[in-house]
Image: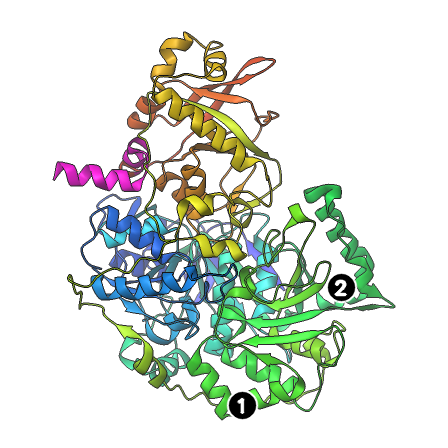
Amino acid sequence: MIELINGGVWLRNGKPSSDDGSQDKNKGRDKSIAYRIMNAHNVSKEVDKFRLKFDAMMSHDITYVGIIQTARASGLTEFPLEYNLTNCHNSLCAVGGTINEDDHVFGLSAAKKYGGNFVPTNLAVIHQYAREAVAACGKMILGSDSHTRYGALGTLAVGEGGPELVKQLLKNTYDIDKPQVILVWLEGSVKHGVGPHDVAIAMCKAVFDNGFVKNKVLEFAGPGVKNLSVDFRNGIDVMTTETTCLSSVWITDDKVKEYYTIHGMADRYKELQTIDGAYYDGMIKINLDKIECMIALPFHPSNAYTVHELQQNGKDILALVEKNAKEQFGSKINFRLTDKASNGKVFVDQGIIAGCAGGLFENLCEAADILDGQSTGSGYFTLSTYPASQPLTMEIVKNGVAAKLLAAGALIKPAFCGPCFGAGDVPSNNGLSIRHTTRNFPNREGSKPGQGQLSSVALMDARSIAATARNGGILTAASDVEYTKTKYDYHYDDSIYQKRVYKGFGKPDKNAELKFGPNITDWPKMNQMSQNMLVKLAAVIHDPVTTTDELIPSGETSSYRSNPLKLSEFALSRRVPEYVSRSKAIQQEDRERRNGKVSQEILSALSKVGDATQLAKVTSYGSCVFATKPGDGSAREQAASCQKVLGGDANICYEFATKRYRSNCINWGIVPFTIDKDTKFDYSEGDFVFVEGIREKIKNGTEDIPAKVITKNGVNDIMLHVKGLTQDEKTILLEGCLMNYYAAQNKKA
């Protein structure tokens, strides 16, 4: 089904072949589609670095307020590139009051003042609007959402934390080491009933745990591409985020050309094809003929099985999920899934087809064909669909697809990303929800383990969700259902956008007034890095991976994203509930230290490594999070900024799950320490780490930094690493955060 080739691959005579070491790999990489696009956007003169300038940016209403506020504090006068603000996350007011709509009003006022585009609430989910109105072959787009992926349209798109967008707004660059490129070679055709999510889930299973594509760019090619529609390609492409790759891009063809033409963007099409002599650092070979209907069980898209495997071994497989949940959450959660398997069948309680992955035209059309003349039943099972944009909704109303879905008992809801992160259609406790959405992490989709609530979400393709709905909630692979697939032509009507989208790019109005609601606040003051660093462990997490949903929960907390102080109250609340109170206590002690009143705790810790009184004058005191592998999942900057707002100075880990979370830490002045794989970290909350001369070491680019761990039982040596900081990143850490960095630049100017 999927084969991984770990080693160099060259394209010769239109086909991949193994590396024989006879050619220049760097010149070969330059021939890849990915490097051809990045080279065209690169302003760096360094051989091994990219300094990229993007063509356009995308943000939604969880992230754009913080980004604009940060840029504004750093000297923003107008948007220098196309910046699209969509409203598809904080569309449902989960906590009451005016705060969500206040953000939307602020967003429109910012678009008017600084010259941006504003897409009103529920008009489109962020990535569908980008596909319909922003993408272009050879273009680069930066988005403050991790699923910023438009590779199937020939657009190299990257999802990052908000500070990276701030850099573009301030005419700076996106700086990365030149990434490796992995060829994804597609052959064959998918079987009846198999959809894009099946391919994507199978790929996540093959590459996530082994890190095969981590921080690399995926380039899709091969004879199988022509057998996939553009919608199908989009559905696979958006899920490449879950492999932890940096970005993705596909070859383009007449089908992509037709897509651009239908969407009134024919001039944006350009043929992108692989060329002989292109070099790739590895290959994923996918035989589409052999892809089965898949299901990704809680709590990760890579925890995948074929639907048939789960049907045949339901009790055993679900018992493994229960075991994993108990290991992670302990006995405080009465988590049950095995009761969903009975008499060779698996029963589910809810189906959702939504968002940038599920709510696509062909997914909804084929789901309607499966449900045509059928019923979802009147039992516990429910089915909801969320078309990804209003133009798409208009088309399924006109062609009868909406009528088929409604007649079967499905609900049709507006464009909204809520089901993906817990702000809509939260399943019942111990219910099992099957979803064509992007993620199923713990502490997501409404889970509150600290309150004994855990959502069980499994990812499936829309086709198998519809087949399950047709079967009254009994898990069913679409490949096992007889139905006729209707060919629906798509007629795009952008009149809704023409009437409702504010198009202000290139037309800033400096006299326009920003409109602030009472929940929209400025960032608190961040301190510069001191000569030495003393941090106290406020959270120690030994889970294999810690997601951004655990670092800062999604769901109703999203409403507070424009208020750094209020949002920080939720930091790690669903994983280490004591973290906030611990961090606040540490932060208060540091405030008192800076005012000359040094606590006995600080003096006691410092006395074990030197002259406590003298050290206290030149040593900062902050909180620290240890996690084995933090940062998988969302690009949300708040996973780092909330730690900083609470006085966080460092993260310590074996490795960062994603480049974007590490970048978020750096941009918020949190030192991203790593330790060697064989280092035993058996320290606890309340222990200290002292780093002497940290400011000088960061300034000089010292990558191996000796430190002391101070425990009640004594002092231990530990070697910390800070690898590969750019000069700008060093300065950002020294200044205390990205805002301070720009403020310092403005003072010099």
Residue at screen point 53% across, 59% down: 284
315 up-or-down from 377: above or below: above
Q: Residue furthest right?
A: 343
- Give x and y (percent) for residue 600: 48, 14
Numbered badge on residue 487 = 1
| Kind of residue indicated by mark 2 | Leu
- Give x and y (percent) for residue 503: 26, 73
736 up-or-down from 420: above or below: above
Helix, strand or loop status at disc 2: helix
Question: What is the C-alpha distance between the residues marked 2 and 1?
Answer: 31 Å
**To which residue does mark 2 refer?**
310
Tell me, yes or no, whether the highlighted magenta stretch contains residue 736.
yes
| Kind of residue indicated by mark 1 | Lys
* Residue 738 horizontal side relative to residue 185, left or right: left
* Residue 370 horizontal side relative to residue 128, left or right: right
Residue interval drawn in magenta: 729-749
